Structures are given as C-alpha cells and as structure tokens.
Image (tube, rainbow, N blue to C red):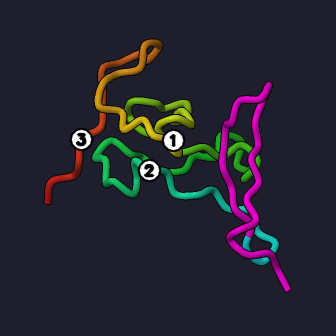
Amino acid sequence: MGKDISDIDRFGDEGKDINLYYIIEENKMLLEPNCYKRKCKHYIGVIQPDGTEETETNNCKAFPEGIPYEIAYGSNKHLKPLEDQKNDIVYEQITE
C-alpha cells in the first residue's frame, strides 16, 4: 500500500525550504499554498520550469520565480511587500 498524506518530505537548498510536497500512492505532489487557500487574486499556480515535478514551484504576480516559503506555507499573510520583493503586489482576496 502507498504512503498517506502524513508522509511529508521537504526539499530545500542550504537549509532553506523551496518546495513542500506530500506523497500519496508513491506520487509526489506539491501542497496547496496558503495564498491559494485564501483565494489571492494574484496566485497563478504551479509552474514547472523544466517540465518536471522536480522543479515545480507555486507562483504569483508578486513572485513569478516562486512564492517564498514563509508566505506559501508559513504564517506571513503577505499584507505588505517583503523587504527584497521586486514589486509592491500584496495579498488581495478574489471578489466574486
């Protein structure tokens, strides 16, 4: 039988989390980021730069190169730009 959602594996570089995955039935899947769950209108989705799951990242208009861990999975609600952010886009909920 495959692994369940409780089997979490973090991948990172120099101790810094880049992507967060869970494993179900032997398939590695990127977890939904907080900004998606909170329905941020700037969220673009998962991008695979080289076409493989190994490089996939969650992306948005504020972070086209990948949403930082502290926003995607941490406690930062991104209500103000990060110090090193290259634009001033912040969280805005989708209005229906």
Say above or below: 68 vs 27.
above
Say above or below: 42 vs 38.
above
Of the 4 image quadrants, the one containing the N terminus is: bottom right
Q: What separation in Å lies between label 1 and label 2 (alpha carbons)? A: 8 Å
Where residue 34 is drawn, which disc sits there?
2
Give the magenta-colored segment's residue range: 1-23
Q: Residue at x 70, y 49 (%)?
A: 51
Give the residue type at disc 3: Glu
- Image coordinates for residue 49, horizontal then vertical, percent: 65, 40
- Which secondary structure lies at badge 2? helix
Q: Name the residue that disc number 3 marks.
A: 92
Q: Magenta region's main secondary structure?
A: strand
Where residue 15 is drawn, which disc sits there?
none
Give the residue type at disc 1: Gly
Of tags 1 and 3, the one toward the viewer is: 1
Magenta span contains residue 5 = yes
Left or right of 25 in this view: 94: left
Asked if labels 3 and 1 touch by Cβ distance under 8 angstroms, the answer is: no
Of tags 1 and 2, the one toward the viewer is: 1
Circle 2 crowding by C-alpha within 10 Å: few under 14, some 14–19, many from 20: some
Location of residue 16 by image quarter: top right
Q: Earlier in the sequence, mark 1 or mark 3?
A: 1
Q: Name the residue that disc number 1 marks.
A: 74
Give the residue type at disc 2: Asn
Circle 1 crowding by C-alpha within 10 Å: few under 14, some 14–19, many from 20: few
- For the residue pair 33 and 54, the one nearer the viewer reads as 33
- Which secondary structure lies at badge 3? loop
Q: Earlier in the sequence, mark 1 or mark 2?
A: 2
The residue most toward the front is 75
Asked if labels 2 and 1 touch by Cβ distance under 8 angstroms, the answer is: yes
- For the residue pair 19 and 75, the one nearer the viewer reads as 75
Q: What separation in Å lies between label 1 and label 3 (alpha carbons)? A: 17 Å
